[in-house]
Image (tube, rainbow, N blue to C red):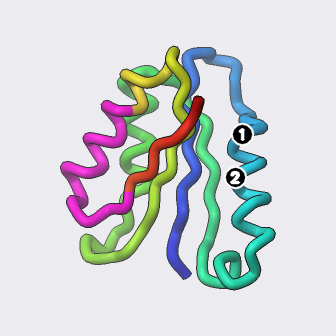
């Protein structure tokens, strides 16, 4: 199973749920050939440096050669924080598959 992390970096401390991540998860689940090979984990994290560091630790696999995907939902208000987290993940695991999308 390939871990697929769906991530939204929030600027609101109390924001812990993302409908967008739910939609993305549902889309993956609707494709049986994809769903059978992935393990989806959703993360909604506050955009603070501390929370960003915790997110990086949470998505990096113990095995440095393991395959994994991190998909970010991006809006104009969270783009800088999101790109900073994506860069940290890519620096730690250059072969990581990073997906960024949004409006």
Q: Of helix, strand and loop, which mostly describes the magenta segment?
A: helix
Mark 1 lies on residue = 20
**Residue nearer the viewer, 50 or 22:** 22
Give the residue drawn at x 75%, y 81%: 32
Mark 2 lies on residue = 24
The answer to whether residue 78 is left or right of residue 44 is left
> Does residue 40 lie above or below 101 as drawn?
below
Image quadrant occupied by the N terminus = bottom right
Mark 2 surroundings: few (<14), some (14-19) or many (≥20) residues within 10 A: some
- Mark number, residue 37: none
The answer to whether residue 69 is left or right of residue 12 is left
**Residue nearer the viewer, 73 or 5:** 73
Label 2–label 1 contact, CB within 8 A? yes
Give the residue drawn at x 30%, y 49%: 89
Residue 53 on image: x %, y % = 36, 36
Residue 82 on image: x %, y % = 42, 31
Q: CA distance from mark 2 to mark 1?
A: 6 Å
Mark 1 surroundings: few (<14), some (14-19) or many (≥20) residues within 10 A: some
Residue 10 on image: x %, y % = 57, 24
> Does residue 7 lie above or below 5 as drawn?
above
Give the residue drawn at x 46%, y 54%: 70
Q: Magenta segment, which residues?
A: 83-97
Q: Determine the secondary structure under disc 1.
A: helix
């Amino acid at each position: 199973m390939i871990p697929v992390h769906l991530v939204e970096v929030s600027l609101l401390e109390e924001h812990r749920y993302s409908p967008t991540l739910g939609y993305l998860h549902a889309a993956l689940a609707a494709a049986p050939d994809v769903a059978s090979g992935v393990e989806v984990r959703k993360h909604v994290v506050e955009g603070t440096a501390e929370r960003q560091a915790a997110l990086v630790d949470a998505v990096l696999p113990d095995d440095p050669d393991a395959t994994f995907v991190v998909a970010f939902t991006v809006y104009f208000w969270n783009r800088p924080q999101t790109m900073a987290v994506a860069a940290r993940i890519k620096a730690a695991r250059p072969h990581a598959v990073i997906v960024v999308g949004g409006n």
